[in-house]
Amino acid sequence: MNRRSFLPISNEFSPQLMKLQTRARLGVLILFAALILLIAGVAGHALMRGLAAAERWQAEEVAQRAVRVVKAECEALRRTAHDYAVWDDSVAYIHAPNATYEAGNWTAASLSNVEVDLMMLFSPNGGLAGGACVQPDGESLNRPTAGQIAGFAAEVRQVIADESAAELVADLCLVDGKPAFFSCQPVLPTSGNGPPQGALVAVRWIDDQLQTRLEQLMGFPVVLLPLSEAAAVAAGKARRDADVEVILLSDARMAVEAPLRTRDGRALLRLRIELDRVVYQEGLRARRLMFWQLLAAAVVMALLTAWFLRAQVVRRLENLSGELRAIGTDARARGRVREEGSDEITDLARGFNEMIAGLERGERERDHARQEREHLQEQLLQAQKMEAVGEFAGGIAHDFNNCLTSIVGWMQLTKEELPADHPAQENVHFALNSVEHAASVVRQLLTYSRHGAVQFAELRLGELLSESMALLRSGLPRPVELRIHAEGIDDRVLADRTQLLQVLMNLINNARDAMSGMGTLTITLDAVSSPSAVVPQSLHLPTGAYVRLSVQDTGPGIAPEHLARLFTPFFTTKPAGKGTGLGLAVVQSVVARHQGVVWVESRLGAGATFHVLLPQHAAAADSAPVAPAVEVDVRGLRILMAEDDPNVSHLLATAFRRRGCELVVAGDGAEAWELLTRPEALFDVVLTDLTMPRLDGLQLGAKIFDSGCKIPVVLMTAYGATLDAEQVRQAGFDAVLSKPLIHDQVLVALAQAVGRRRGPKGG
């Protein structure tokens, strides 16, 4: 193409480029707007459908539980009737009615004690031998009426006609127009043998007392409605005969109804419970929050995309347009644009001769991306498994920390009460050491569950190995030779000393068990400047300097089919009772928290080598000296403590009062807030636990800060790493204390909090 024929093309390129830029920006905005609407609509609809199903299931469960409670009441009446029916005195009364039996069993007090309102004894021919009916005043008795006797004639005949005395009837019924439970049973001697000597009928009215008991058991308002009234409440409903029906009263309330049926399936009453639609309300809030989050993300992504298009595409196309225009107007020797870089725009300048190579390169990149995606999906599944196990471990550690707080506190108080030369001092010392060991176990659980507080500091792995030599050697059998190669490298890392020691101990114990008590165990430290050259392709690390810790054993090696599952929680190749399957899982969790990776190399018959790669830490300036501890005087300090664990609260209360503090204990945050808002409340500081019923520690603190009260607040928690200590202080809390606690530590924190609020003079 010559210069003249190229000139029209170059002149037309610039206007087309401006149109392309405008269309690209509009397209990006429209695309993100449509995407946000689609995601918000589909996700919101799916969310609300799921929440509606969960809400209905919850309501149906409540109704079915209430029906089971009613059936249990009927069963209780059947057992009471059985006690009267299988009794020699009842047999004797049927054959010879007497006042002694009536005075002993048919008084208003005795019938009320067994929760029976009507009791009748029938002779073998079906006639009434005797009976009593408690009147509405609860103090007087009447003989059963003819209607009451006739109402149970069929059941009495059915029970007496059964020669095996196995026929028992317990059901709902209407007696004199009132709903009731009843039980009809054969009268037998106390031995329970022989044919029926008659029949006993026991009746209990379904009244307000039963409704009150249902409300106490269920925790919700319960109404027992006659079927006609229930039908009027929900007029027009299509499912009147359904076992359980959920009625939406409003966005905030719903009702669930269930029929109480007799044995023949006839509905006698309808049980109605009203519930708050907590799930639905939370779903509405979550849906609104999701929409605004997606909207904000879409706006940010649209702006970033427009900027990226301008910086990386449009500007280069403008340069290309200028060069094309110059080629069309300038009679240069070579009519070519510059070929710089190796991206798509440069490929356009090179032409079709590189098209095939570019397609092949793109195909290889797609295969690599597919493999990467599959690997990331496997890592995501593994992370989800470890998160589930970690949450379980964190819950156990949380409860255990509360127990340890109580144990260590009482041991400290005992130690303080005993004279220094008392023989029991040594026992207390050993007990406190055991508690410290238990706290170490808790920290390991919290480390695995990622709830543990991690204290990162610069340390040298070589020094850690040297200082821990005795500990490492003590856990190995004498026939095992331990070799350590850790010289001449920069082995500084930023890590938690306790957790790295735990990693080392777990790897050494694993190697010891693999060698069955004899062999050579080698620990090596070396520097790695190019992680991609030593780390497996499935693991990814940023470029930089690293320190590698390798633990090699001379055991039998690991089977290939087990390599992929070694770091899976609870997976172990050891015999039953020899391993928990958590050692290597904890190693992987700790190493990942330190921004490193761990992998294993092994062949059958050639032992195994575990490699841990951690980022090398550059030398840092010396830290400021730590201020010495200061004794504090807490006598007269007025403390309001909110703690739901009675053992912890009793311990701290004892310790505080021995130090001369004035203490008021609240069982939860709501009770503490009530005490704090009383006019006569005069407290210097508030000490609150994090996790409590009704009102937790964060909510209590928020109420105190929002009220404008200037009282300092100190927060306690059984796993402090779930909270950012600096963020908690910025929210208004003066300190965050992690359990297990030592009471002197708590008192120092309280005194410091009061001192900061009062100023240098403390008042």
Image: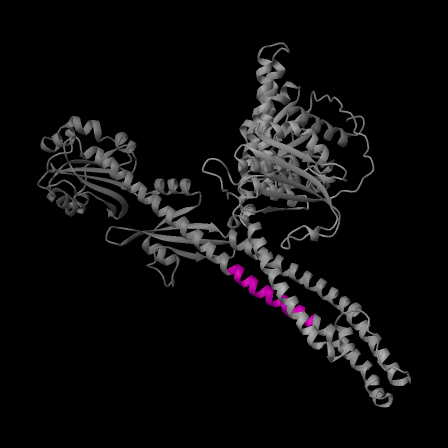
For the N terminus, the quadrant is bottom right
User: Which residue is located at x 63 percent, y 9 percent?
Assistant: 421
The outermost residue toward the right is 331
Residue range highlighted in magenta: 29-48
Looking at the image, which is closer to me, 319 or 182?
319
**Magenta stretch holds residue 127:** no
> Total number of numbered labels?
0
Q: Quadrant of residue 520?
A: top right
Residue 446 lies left or right of residue 242; in this view the side is: right
Looking at the image, which is closer to me, 381 or 141?
381
Looking at the image, which is closer to me, 112 or 689?
689
**Magenta stretch holds residue 30:** yes
* Vertical arrangement, residue 752 with respect to residue 456, above or below: above
Residue 226 visible in this rendered orientation of the protein:
yes
For the C terminus, the quadrant is top right
Residue 407 lies left or right of residue 79; in this view the side is: right
The outermost residue toward the bottom is 5
Report the magenta stretch's main SS.
helix
Residue 97 lies left or right of residue 509; in this view the side is: left
Q: Position of residue 679 (x, y in %)?
A: 65, 31
Q: Position of residue 624 (x, y in %)?
A: 82, 33
Residue 691 visible in this rendered orientation of the protein:
no
User: Which residue is located at x 46 percent, y 35 percent?
Assistant: 577
The figure's colour scheme reads one colour
Q: Quadrant of residue 608?
A: top right
Q: Quadrant of residue 619?
A: top right
Looking at the image, which is closer to me, 453 or 197?
453
Q: Position of residue 330 (x, y in %)?
A: 91, 84
The outermost residue toward the front is 605
User: Which residue is located at x 64 percent, y 25 percent?
Assistant: 743
Q: Position of residue 238 (x, y in %)?
A: 37, 63
